[in-house]
Amino acid sequence: MPTDKNRATAAAILPLVGGPDNVTSIAHCMTRLRIALRDRSLVDDEALKALPAVMGVVEDDTYQIVLGPGTVARVTPEFEALVEEGRSAAAAAHPHTHAHAHPVTAEELQAQGAALKEARKARNATPFKLFLRRIANIFVPLIPALIGCGVIAGLNGVLTNLGWLPGLVPALTAMASGFMSLIAVFVGHNTAKEFGGTAVLGGAVAAIIVFPGVAKITAFGLELKPGQGGVLGALAAALLAVHVEKWCRRWVPEALDVLVTPTLTVLVSGLVTLFGLMFIAGEASSAIGTFANRLLATGGAFAGLILGGLFLPLVMLGLHQALIPIHTTLIEQSGYTVLLPILAMAGAGQVGAAIAVYYKLPRNGSLRATIKSALPAGFLGVGEPLIYGVSLPLGRPFVTACVGGAAGGAFVGLCNQLGVAFGSTAIGPSGWALFPLLDGKSGMGVTIAIYAGGLTVGYLVGFAATYFFGFTRLLCTSLNQGDEEADMTAEEPGAPTDQAGPRATDSAALTR
C-alpha cells in the first residue's frame, strides 16, 4: 500500500509538470522533488498545490515540489520510473518519428518559454548567488558523513564520561575522527568536480594539506603544520588545480596530454599550495574561529538576536549557503560550530508561528490540516513545509516567525556570553534532531538544557508574536470562513482536504 500511495502521488504530479517529455532531470533533497523542465509554461502550479501530498512549490534553478521528509525519498523513484515508462511508450508508439521530432519540439518549446523563463530567473541568477550555490554543491554531499561521524562522536563522549565500554572508545574515536582528518581531500575532490576539472586531481592537490610530511617543510622561515588552512585551503587549492588543468588541456599536445597535464596540475598547484595558499588559508581559518568565539563571548545576546532573526530571510534569498564553509571550518578547528544552535532557533520561531496560525484560524480546516501534517517535520528542524505552505504565503506570520527565532537566538547567545559555549558537531539537522549532535565545554546536561531552553523561547515568542500581531483583521476574517460541517470533515483522519482553498484565499486577502 505505501508503494501504491507513492506511485499514485508521482502519477498525479507527472501530467501537471508537462508529462515525461517536459522533464529533463530529476533529483531530490531532504524535502523537495527537484525537476528541470524544458518548458516552464506547461506546469499547472495551482493544480500541483491542490494535491494532498504537495505542501508547496518553489522555483529556483530547478522547479521544486515540497513533499516533506521521508515522502520525497519514496515518491522520487516512482516519479523517475513513470518518466522512463512514458518515454519508452512514446518511443515504441512512434519508432521512426519520435527520435527525430523530439529534439525539434524541445527547441521550439525552449524558444517559446525562453523569455518568460529568463525574466523569472533574472532576480536570483546574480553571479554572487550562483557562486554561493556552487560552493554549497561542494559541501552538501559531505553532510551525511558529517552527521554520522558527529553522532558517533557524541556517543563516544557519553561513553567516555560515564566510563562505560572503555574498550570500544578507541574504535569509536577512529570512526568519528577518520573522516574529519581527511575532509580536505573530499572538499578538493568535490570542488574540482563542481568547477569542471578532474575530481581526483582536485583531491590529490588537497591531500597535500593533510599529509603529515608537510611538517618538515619550511618556507620564508615559517614551518608548515599538517591540516593548516583546512577546508578553505583545500577549496582554494582545488580551484587553482582546475585552472591549471584547463590551461594544460588547451596548450599541451594531445599525444602528451595524459602524461603532462596531470603532472603539471599537481606540481604547479601543489607548489603554490605549499608556499602560499596554506599560509593564507590558515590565517583566514584562524580569523573565522577567533571572530565567531569572540563575537559570542562579548556580544552573544545581540549577535544571537541578529543571527536568529535573519536566518529565515537568508534562507529565502539563498545567502545561507555562504555559512556552510564557515560551519565546516569551525567544526574542523574545535570539533563543533557554535553558530548552528543559534541559527536553529529560526526553525523554533517558525514552529511557534505555525501553531499560532492553527489556533487563530479554527474554521479553516484545510490550512489546519496542512499545519498538522508539517509540524512533525518542523519540530525535527525541517521548516520548508511550514515556510512555503503556511507562513510565507500569509505574509505577517513569516515576520513574526523571525521574531521568535530572534528571541531564541538571543537566549542561546546570552548563555554563550555568560561562558556556556557549545555547538553542533555536524551541519544539516536542527530542531530536536540537533540534540544528538550537541557538544560543549560545560557538560552535556547543561548544553542540552540551554539548547532546549532556546527552543522553548523560540516556540513561545513565535506563537505569541503571531497570535497577537500576525494578522490584520481583514486577513483573519478572510481566512477564518467556512461552515462547521466542512471544517469537521476536514479535521477527520483520512478525510480529503482541498489544499488549494486556503492558498487561493490567502492570495486574495494579501492583495487587498
Image (cartoon, grey):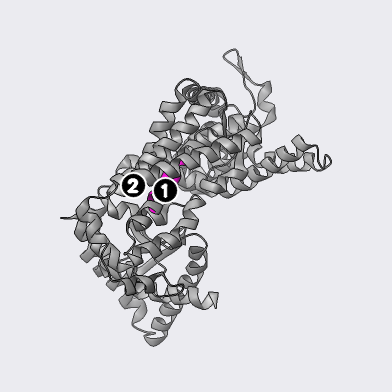
Q: Which residue is mark 2?
A: 466
User: Which residue has dot 1 on it?
Assistant: 352
Does the segment drawn in magenta span residue 389? no
Between marks 1 and 2, how big is the CA–CA gap? 8 Å
- Category of crowding for the residue at label 1, using alpha-carbon neighbours closer than 10 angstroms: few (below 14), some (14–19), many (at least 20): many
Three-letter amino acid code of the residue under disc 2: Thr
Q: Is residue 333 above or below residue 251?
A: above
Residue toward you, 311 or 221: 311
Residue 370, image x, y percentages: 39, 63
Callout 2: 10 Å neighbours few (<14), some, many (20+)? many
The outermost residue toward the top is 221
Q: Could you tell me which residue is drawn at 26 percent across and 60 percent down?
A: 479
Residue 481 appears in the rendering: yes
Residue 384, how many percent across, how many down?
41, 53
Is 4 located above or below residue 42 in the figure? below
The region drawn magenta spans 344-354
Which image quadrant: the N terminus? bottom right
